[in-house]
Amino acid sequence: MNARNKLNVAYTNGCLLMAAIAGGATGSWAVFLLAAAALASACVANGQIRHRPTRR
């Protein structure tokens, strides 16, 4: 596993952890799913989660 994949896994785990905290605090699966989707899409938009390598 290369460094980009390891970073993607770390950011994805962080998104899921934060969503679990939000969902657990409210006791709602819907909040968990919405938070997970919002956080994951924000990480992709920020460039923290990269699907393809960037060209040099």
Image (cartoon, helix red, strand yellow):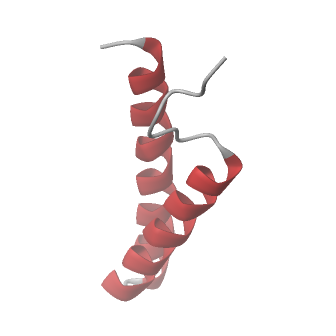
43 relative position to 15: left or right: right
Residue at 46% across, 70% down: 37
Please say if 20 is above or below 27.
above
Q: Nearer the viewer, residue 23 or 43?
A: 43
Please say if 23 is above or below 39.
below
Tag count in the figure? 0
Residue at 54% across, 63% down: 41
Q: Where does the C terminus fall, quadrant-wise?
A: top right
Residue at 50% across, 58% down: 40
Residue at 65% across, 43% down: 47
The quadrant in which residue 10 appears is top left
Q: In the image, residue 16 lies at what x, y percent?
A: 41, 55
Tell which residue pokes out farthest to the front in this image: 55
Q: Where does the N terminus fall, quadrant-wise?
A: top left
Q: In the image, residue 13 lies at what x, y percent?
A: 41, 43
23 relative position to 42: left or right: left
Q: In the image, residue 45 lies at what x, y percent?
A: 65, 56
Q: In the image, residue 38 lies at what x, y percent?
A: 55, 71
